[in-house]
Amino acid sequence: MQAISILAFPWREPAAVLCAFAEEPFAMGLLSGGGGAHGRWSYVLRQPDRTAVLHAGDEGDAAAILRNLLGEALPHDPSGPPFQGGVAGLAAYELGARFEPVDLPRDRHWPDLSVGRYPAFLAFDHAAKRVLAVGRGENAARAEACAQQAGDWLNGVEHAPVTGALAEDFTPLQAPQAYEHAVAEVVGRIVEGELFQANIARGWSGRLAARVRPFDVIRRLSSDSPAPFAAYLRLPGAAVVSNSPERFLASSAGGYRVETRPIKGTRPRGRTPDEDEALIEDLRGSAKDRAENLMIVDLMRNDLARVCAPGAVAAPELFRIESFANVHHLVSTVTGRLAQGLTAIDLLRAAFPPGSITGAPKVQAMRVISGLEAPRGPYCGSMFWAGFDGALDSSVLIRTLAFVEDDAGWRFEARAGAGIVADSDPAAERQETEDKISALRRALTETSA
């Protein structure tokens, strides 16, 4: 795959294009939204030429598998999108047990790793309102043929969005008091010195209505509450839908700049502009939320320092307020430069799973989480792409639904968590999970116009 071809086409909405083949195994959409630099590019991928699935009991090094799929680094076209072909897919949360010294139970429905290698795909530039078909091949003619094949996907038949309620139910998996008890337990363990912070989640489950498919959920979310790291992946008998606002790791081709943008600190949106602004100011001035955010910044600095050049890791921006359809978040940025000879795959291995959804110290937080929660599967893992040119981008799979198909249709599970520290109030942390899950709840249970 030495050559690359990029062809330009008129604008179409990426979800409308993905609609035509959303049921194919390893069909994938990275559906950025919400504007800004982190919401500029969307990607639609299908028909990988190779796939790799790593189950819990399988032998194998996940990083080596990814390196083998990617092969030698290929040139980057500066006129093209950030992703220029390569590997994309799902790293489940429990993949972390292969990278860190911790034993994690698994959900049999979810492999640790599910990826495809995509030599052809569509890139949607939201800023310029253009579509780029990208193809890779062993020579220029083959690369152009792959790009043209991807361009032909734009002629697929679009189906009308579903307008009714998408789910039959959306039911808590535990009583609110049970979650508050778990929070109180973690607070006690923090006070005793076992750890400093842990992200503890609670779950909801339900079943899609008849003839509704997981793609209908991501389509509604991308319309009603767009997020910069929204994603869809169809696997055999399963699917993942994510409306994540959070970047996990990004790396430029060559590793000259790497970045992570952890989220810690949340407030709901207000019912009026004045109430909304008051909530922003409350979050901005919260010593607890700033301390919680800074703790994860320090953790991510440490993770990046494992693979970055000495002295290259920095935190150029702390405590930025970012607002989304249902919540405000406190977001910080940590950057670095990969050490000579290391790649984005080394970066992924060094930092996975994300610090913002584990805690500090990370390994002990993971142990505490595994004692209080069922296996997470996709939740708090990552949807990512790793380019032939060495570039990388990835999300933290929060605001995420995990779908499993059975004889009756599609059932799902969703979770929302909160970072627990020494002065956490169990009732307030429970309310934070309600705020975070609200966009998914509305998308599934309310009737769309």
Image (spheres, rainbow, N blue to C red):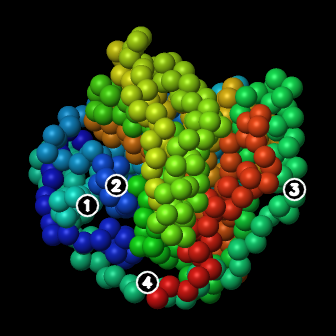
- Badge 1 or badge 2: first in the primary sequence: 2
Query: Can you give x and y, in whole percent of width and height, for residue 348 in the image?
Result: 49, 33
Camera-side mark, 2 or 4? 2
Q: What residue sits right under mark 4 in the picture?
A: 161
Residues at discs 3 and 4 in contact (Cβ within 8 Å): no
Q: Amino acid at mark 2?
A: Gly
Q: Rate crowding at label 2 as few (under 14), some (14 to 19) or many (20 or more) other CA atoms within 10 Å.
A: many
Q: CA distance from mark 4 to mark 1?
A: 21 Å
Q: Amino acid at mark 1?
A: His
Residues at discs 2 and 4 in contact (Cβ within 8 Å): no
Q: Amino acid at mark 3?
A: Ala
Residue at left 55%, top 70%? 271
Q: CA distance from mark 3 to mark 4?
A: 37 Å
Q: What residue sits right under mark 3 in the picture?
A: 178
Task: Confirm whether residue 434 shows in the render.
Answer: yes
**270 vs 84: above or below:** below
- Badge 2 or badge 4: first in the primary sequence: 2
**SS type, badge 4:** loop
Q: CA distance from mark 1 to mark 2?
A: 8 Å
Q: CA distance from mark 2 to mark 4?
A: 22 Å
